[in-house]
Image (cartoon, grey):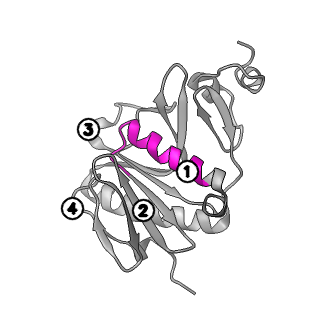
Amino acid sequence: MASGFAAASAGEMATAEDLLAAGDLGRCELVRGMLVMMSPAGFEHGVITQRIAAFLHAYVAGRRLGVVTAAETGFLLARAPDTVRAADVAFVTESRLPRGRTVGFFEGAPDLTVEVLSPSELRDDAARTRATLEVAGWLAAGCLEVWSVDPGSRTMTVHTASRGSRLFNEAETFVSAAMPGMAVTIAELFPPAS
C-alpha cells in the first residue's frame, strides 16, 4: 500500500496502524478501512463535552473505577477492514485497561460512549442517519451504554443493546448501567440556561 492515507484517499483500504502513523490529519475516523473527515466541533459542543468529561471523571476517579477519556480518543472497534471511531467522551472500566503505557488506539469499545450532537446531526437527514449508525456500531462492538446529548433541546437519549433507547429531559435523573450507582440529573450536564 502507498503511504497509508494517500492510498486510502485513492479508494484503497487503510488500517488502524496507517491512521496512527499518519500523524495529525485533523478530526477523522476510519470506517471499514476508509478515512472519514469531520469538521471541528463548535464552541457549545466543546463546553458541553468538557462538562460531561469533568462530571464523569469526578465520579470515576474518586472510586477508582477506570478512566474517562475526551478529545476524540480513538477506539479500534473492528479489524479487516479496520474501524477506528472517536468518542467525544468515553469511560473504560479498570478491569479492561491495558497494563502500562498505551500509545495507540484502545482495542475494543469503551463501556460508556458519550456523543454530543452537532447542529447538522439534528437538522440534516444524512447526518442524523450517520449518527444513528454510529450508535449502533458502538453497541455492536460491545459498548454497554451510549449517551446522545442534544444541546438544543437540553435532552439526552440513553442507548443500550439490551433495553433499547430512552429519552431524558433536563429535569429527569437516570442511573447508568455502565457505571453502577451513578445517578445523573440531565441538567447537570449542560451549562446554566441563559
Mark 1 or mark 2, which has the lower sequence index?
1
If the image is split into quadrants, where does the N terminus sit?
A: top right
> At 62% from the left edge and 69% from the top edge, which residue is drawn?
44
* Residue bearing mark 2: 157
Q: Secondary structure at mark 4?
A: loop
Amino acid type for the residue under numbered disc 3: Ser
Q: Considering depth in this image, is 83 or 45 the residue closer to the camera? A: 83
Rendered location of residue 69, percent (x, y): 46, 49
Q: Earlier in the sequence, mark 3 or mark 1?
A: 3
Q: How far from the left and from the top, in percent, is residue 24?
A: 70, 37
Asked if the magenta segment contains residue 133, the reply would be yes
- Disc 3 versus disc 4: nearer the observer: 4
Q: Nearer the viewer, residue 43 or 29?
A: 29
Question: Are discs 3 and 4 less than 8 Å apart at CB?
Answer: no
**Neighbour class for label 3 at 10 Å: few (<14), some, many (≥20)?**
few
Under tag 1, what secondary structure?
helix
Magenta region, residue range:
128-145
The image quadrant where one finds the C terminus is: bottom right
* Cβ–Cβ under 8 Å for marks 2 and 3: no
Instruction: Examine the rendered structure and indicate whether residue 111 appears above or below residue 77.
Output: below
Q: Earlier in the sequence, mark 2 or mark 3?
A: 3
Residue at mark 4: 181
Q: CA distance from mark 3 to mark 1?
A: 29 Å
Between the C-alphas of marks 4 and 1, the distance is 28 Å
Instruction: Tell which residue pokes out farthest to the bottom in this image.
Output: 194
Q: CA distance from mark 1 to mark 2?
A: 12 Å
Q: Badges 4 and 2: C-beta atoms under 8 Å apart?
A: no
* Residue linked to disc 1: 131
